[in-house]
Image (cartoon, grey):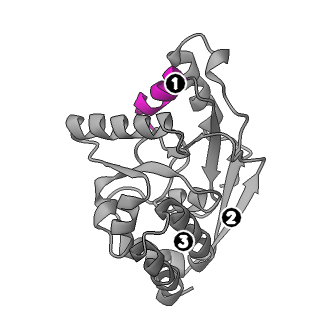
Amino acid sequence: MSWTGVLWPTFALLPRLAAGAEPQSGMHRWARRLVPALGVELEVIGHPRPDIQLWVSNHLSWVDPVLLMSLRPMGTIAKGEVACYPLIGRWAQKSGIHFVDRADATSRAAALASFTASLHGGRDMLLFPEGTTTRGDRLAGFYEGGLRAAFDLGLPAQPLRISSPAPHYPWTGNETLLPHLRTLFGNHTHVTVTAEETLYPADFCDPASWIAAFRAALVPRSTDVR
């Protein structure tokens, strides 16, 4: 692992962005190259379904969307700081990622409206309903808007649960990006993505029970690798 291993996948794909190539597919290719460059060994349990438009995941690290986007092209909601990240920020803005300042109600409403429009338009999307990272021993409270939008649209969604035995994998608190990258460089990191059964709105009487089913699917298990 090295800075070259991280930067090379990014620089290699920048010409496609400049040429107007499909940015969501470009992000998928970039993610597939970046995962091994970060020293992450990804294990997938179950069957993530590419035919299901919405994937829903718990959230441990900034690496989570990279791991899941390596499995297929899709957009997501990300914190506003990502738009300012070197090299990838501009690309991210063009790739179907909707940015949000979660402390700002207006920003949250705008991001939800854009996310809902993407779902309505048929775009594959990724949702982290916690809206923040945890150490992986619990779930944070859900921002329910994205799941309620999928319920109202009648869209099935698949829960994907992320876990890792590596104590350095979660990115929480006030840690900044570059120190966390240096920690990843110095360690081998095993991460597991467990694909749970797809949930269908028609099987639930109301949005509350639908959301509760996602909490049950994503809550950490004693059998998860920690």
Can you give x and y, in whole percent of width and height, for residue 132 in the image? 40, 46
Q: Residues within 10 Å of mark 1 (few under 14, many from 20)?
A: few
Question: At numbered mark 2, what does the secondary structure look like: helix, strand or loop?
Answer: strand
Give the left or right position of residue 47, taking residue 92 as reference. Answer: right
Q: Mark 1 is on which residue type?
A: Leu
Query: In this rendering, does residue 25 appear at all?
Result: yes
Using residue 168 as the reference point, say whether residue 220 is left or right of it: right
Q: Nearer the viewer, mark 2 or mark 1?
A: 1
Discs 3/1, front: 1
Residue at the disc numbered 3: 30
Q: Callout 1: helix, strand or loop?
A: helix
Give the residue type that dot 3 points to: Trp
Q: Which residues are magenta?
A: 140-153
Q: Tell me which secondary structure the magenta stretch mostly adopts.
A: helix
* Distance in Å between CA atoms under marks 2 and 1: 32 Å
- Relative image position of residue 226 (x, y in whole percent): 65, 55
Residue with the mark numbered 2: 42
Q: Nearer the viewer, mark 2 or mark 3?
A: 3
Q: Earlier in the sequence, mark 2 or mark 3?
A: 3
Q: Are marks 3 and 1 in contact (CB under 8 Å)?
A: no
The residue where tag 1 is placed is: 153
